[in-house]
Amino acid sequence: MKTAVLGFGTVGVGVYEMLAKARGLEPGPVLVRPGKEDAPYKVSSMEAIVNDPSVEAVAEVMGGIEPAYTYACAALKAGKHFVTSNKALVAAKGVELNRLAREKGAAFLFSAACGGGVPFLHNLALARESDSILSLGGILNGTTNYMLDAMQRLGLDYAEALADAQRLGYAEADPTADVSGLDALRKIMLACAVAYDLLPTEGLLHEGIDSITAADVRHFQPRGYSCRLLASGGRTESGVYAYVEPVLLREGAPACSVLQNYNMARYEGRNSGPIVLMGQGAGRYPTASAVLRDLSGILRGERYLFSTGCAAGKADNSGSVHCYYVRLPADLAGELEAESTELAGPVARLVTKPMSVSAMHETARRLRARGAALFFAAIGG
Ligand code: HSE
């Protein structure tokens, strides 16, 4: 199956190389920016790809919503299978693309968009057919896991850790989505859509690691805690929840053994119990391997991860409750109901009484609007 590749960055190069070696697949034209056509297989016109009858599938690894969405529609309308690693695209336009692909009888697969090389969505899609998925989530961003690991194990400061993650090709071109938790949020949105037929697009909450400092690490590490950025999703009687936030875990908790750019994705089926999948969540070849798995899947007849009825909807995060570690200016410590508070000059570090995820995120938003520098993390097991 000749496959055109849209984008020739970190992942695109990997996909192109792997296509040349994979059974049943062959590399087609590669779409690059005008002026970058420095080899015969590189083209700068999407029309040339859409109108090439020998191209049966398109693999999009450019990132961003536009022009990726326009290209996705063009490829699907021309009846070509469409595979993408682009979580921003699927989180924003996945419902429409699923509908269009089904109308045209073309595949729409995006395993690489959640978990990098970890075959999470694929297994979730299989599991939902025969089991009821109670909850899902885990460590879904390689950049922030790499950074937290480097800060905690190697003593790097935030800027050094981010620079390393960028140099290693884990971060997005603009790493804001990684460090703010938005990248992980998009991934949990996709996982919820696969598991529950509902792509949550409203009521979502995300807190990243962009407020953590080396001083925070020096505070919680000697107390036996390690920080991970966790995505959480699930379905309760009141609906689907989906949020991302840093969590302090007791050293020895399974997620603490997830190092570097690794992801740890999990789901719990009513019958299967907890299932955990671990592997590299970012980087050229791990991510490209997931794109190639989707393309090989098409050869075996796989077509969709979202079901026919998958629709956008609202998340409800008011039912999830945690105690939180919060570092904030000492004069604002009274804004939260605390189990315990430690004061160190102008800084307070407290542990809150149990509060809902939505209440914690709303409090942080309100205090930051008043100019407060604040870091918070749920206290996990
Ligand atoms: N920037 C993403 C991450 C790439 O760090 O997880 C893989 O989706």
Image (tube, rainbow, N blue to C red):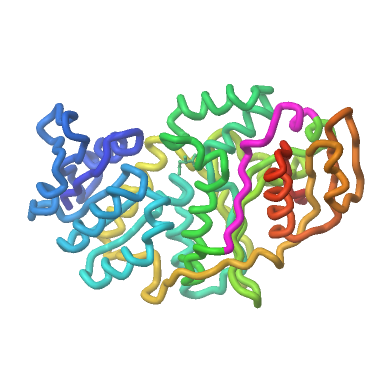
User: How many numbered marks have been drawn onto this rendered protein structure?
Assistant: 0
Is residue 259 or residue 140 the one in the foreground?
140
Residue 325, position as x, y percentages in the image: 79, 44
| Residue shown at 78% from the left, 43% from the top | 326
In this picture, residue 231 sits left or right of residue 198: right
Tell me, yes or no, if residue 275 can be seen here: no
Q: Position of residue 46 (x, y in %)?
A: 16, 47
* Residue at screen point 33% across, 48% down: 291
Up/down of 23 relative to 102, above or below: above
Percent across and percent down for residue 231 are: 60, 52
Q: Nearer the viewer, residue 221 or 378?
A: 378
Q: In the rendered image of this protein, does residue 37 appear above or below residue 204?
A: above
The part of the image, by quadrant, that contains residue 297 is bottom left
Nearer to us in this view, 336 or 222: 336
| Residue 131 drawn at (x, y percent) | 54, 73
Magenta span has 36? Answer: no
Taking 27 as reference, is 157 left or right? right
Q: Which residues are magenta?
A: 203-218
Q: Is residue 204 magenta?
A: yes
Residue 197, relative to residue 122: is it above or below?
Answer: below
Kindly identify the residue that appears in the image at 65 percent across and 64 percent down: 317
Q: In this orientation, does residue 86 appear? A: yes
Q: Quadrant of residue 273?
A: bottom right
Nearer to the camera, 108 or 123: 108
Q: Residue at x 20, y 57 (%)?
A: 75
